[in-house]
Image: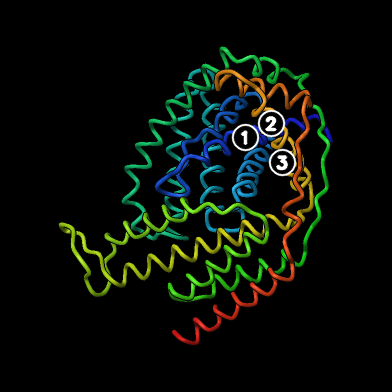
């Protein structure tokens, strides 16, 4: 692996470290982000050329999908749109204006473009036009957090120890030990079939049954189930249903009306997405194989991410000191990631049988409707 590839994967891994910290914060919309993962991108805008920078953006988006378990769901496309649009906008702006623009200005513009792109894609794949009601909230929050992020970037460049080392041409992170994990091809195929069944199913009741079965599969795959994000997702969809009335009115709130048709549509959209997210979690746990340079970089980035996470847990001090220490630790290879084999212990037979039930409910939902 070349020094350039190591550097690309290490930067991508640092975005994943910050993204994993942000993922723990509850949000009203599942794709709403504070932008912490963009901090490493801000720091390398001038020191990285376009081709490596493109790979970093892809690794960031795919890696976030792998870590959070959203890679094979609608949310990945929303995240990808935000990452690529904001990343290239920030890179272009820095290239055109150079020292005439601060990291704060670049961060604000990047956040604005990212939020617009995410809102547009979210309106296409999940929420519909009603999502634009959330535009003022997202753009306003994005403005505030991007200003803070820009100041953090400026402060880290000024006071952090790692950027001075990292931005030199001689910087080469140590190549970590990459552990080859078993590819459970039967689970991969089963989850691809399950995803197709989820997309084919109709109606909130069949999708609720499928969602419960997908959670059972997720448990069999040894992936942690988090209930707060899907509940927040359902709440946001029902809230937005007030702006798209359809059918019999249940109750009114001023000029807004909640109707049976809008609730049924919101539940159908929400349960389908929750089921897809659960299927994505299980598919990720099957360790699907990717090929090519991007795949090699992704494996390396995830290895660095595991090391950075282990380092972050051991380093003490303020947040800045912990991030600085974790980056030094990861670059020097002081620690190696501890890989757990628990994801490989799930029963493939049980998963396949449960997937057959999912397919049966999906087909029945079309017959009954």
Marks 1 and 3, the one that precedes in the sequence:
1
Kind of element beneath mark 1:
helix
Marks 2 and 1, the one that precedes in the sequence:
1
Q: Are marks 1 and 3 in contact (CB under 8 Å)?
A: no
Please state which of residues 237 and 109 is positioned toward the viewer in this rendering. Answer: 237
**Can you give x and y, in whole percent of width and height, for residue 71 in the image?**
61, 53
**Which residue corresponds to the image point at 46% horizontal and 48% vertical from the top-left?**
118
Mark 1 vs mark 3, CA separation in Å: 10 Å
Residue for badge 2:
308
**Which residue corresponds to the image point at 60% horizontal and 65% vertical from the top-left?**
216
Residue 17, numbered label: 1
Residue for badge 3:
302
**Can you give x and y, in whole percent of width and height, for residue 357 in the image?**
61, 77
Left or right: residue 220 versus residue 102 is right
**Can you give x and y, in whole percent of width and height, for residue 17 in the image?**
62, 34
Q: Using a 10 Å C-alpha cutoff, classify the residue at mark 3 as few (fewer than 14 neighbours), some (14 to 19) or many (20 or more).
A: many
């Amino acid at each position: 692996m070349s020094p350039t590839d190591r550097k690309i994967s290490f930067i991508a891994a640092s975005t994943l470290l910050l993204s994993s910290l942000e993922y723990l914060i509850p949000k009203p919309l599942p794709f709403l982000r504070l932008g912490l993962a963009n901090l490493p991108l801000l720091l390398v805008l001038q020191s990285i050329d376009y081709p490596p920078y493109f790979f970093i953006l892809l690794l960031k988006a795919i890696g976030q999908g792998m870590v959070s378990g959203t890679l094979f769901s609608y949310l990945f496309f929303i995240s990808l749109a935000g990452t690529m649009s904001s990343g290239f906008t920030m890179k272009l702006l820095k290239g055109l204006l150079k020292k005439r623009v601060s990291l704060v200005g670049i961060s604000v513009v990047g956040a604005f473009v990212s939020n617009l792109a995410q809102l547009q894609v979210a309106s296409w794949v999940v929420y519909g036009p009603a999502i634009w009601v959330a535009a003022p909230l997202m753009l306003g929050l994005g403005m505030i957090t991007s200003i803070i992020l820009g100041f953090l970037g400026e402060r880290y460049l000024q006071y952090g120890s790692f950027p001075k080392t990292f931005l030199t041409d001689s910087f080469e992170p140590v190549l970590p030990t990459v552990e080859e994990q078993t590819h459970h091809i039967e689970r991969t195929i089963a989850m691809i079939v399950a995803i197709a069944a989820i997309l084919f199913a109709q109606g909130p009741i069949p999708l609720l049954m499928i969602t419960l079965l997908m959670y059972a599969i997720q448990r069999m795959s040894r992936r942690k189930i988090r209930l707060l994000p899907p509940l927040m997702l359902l709440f946001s969809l029902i809230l937005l249903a007030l702006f798209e009335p359809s059918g019999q009115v249940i109750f009114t709130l001023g000029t807004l009306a909640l109707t049976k048709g809008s609730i049924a549509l919101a539940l159908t959209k929400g349960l389908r997405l929750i089921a897809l997210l659960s299927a994505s979690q299980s598919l990720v746990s099957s360790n699907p194989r990717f090929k090519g340079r991007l795949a090699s970089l992704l494996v390396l980035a995830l290895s660095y991410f595991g090391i950075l996470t282990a380092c972050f847990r051991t380093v003490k001090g303020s947040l800045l000191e912990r991030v600085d220490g974790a980056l030094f630790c990861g670059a020097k290879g002081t620690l190696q990631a501890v890989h757990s084999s628990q994801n490989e212990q799930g029963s493939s037979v049980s998963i396949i049988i449960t997937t057959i039930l999912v397919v049966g409910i999906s087909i029945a939902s079309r017959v009954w409707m």
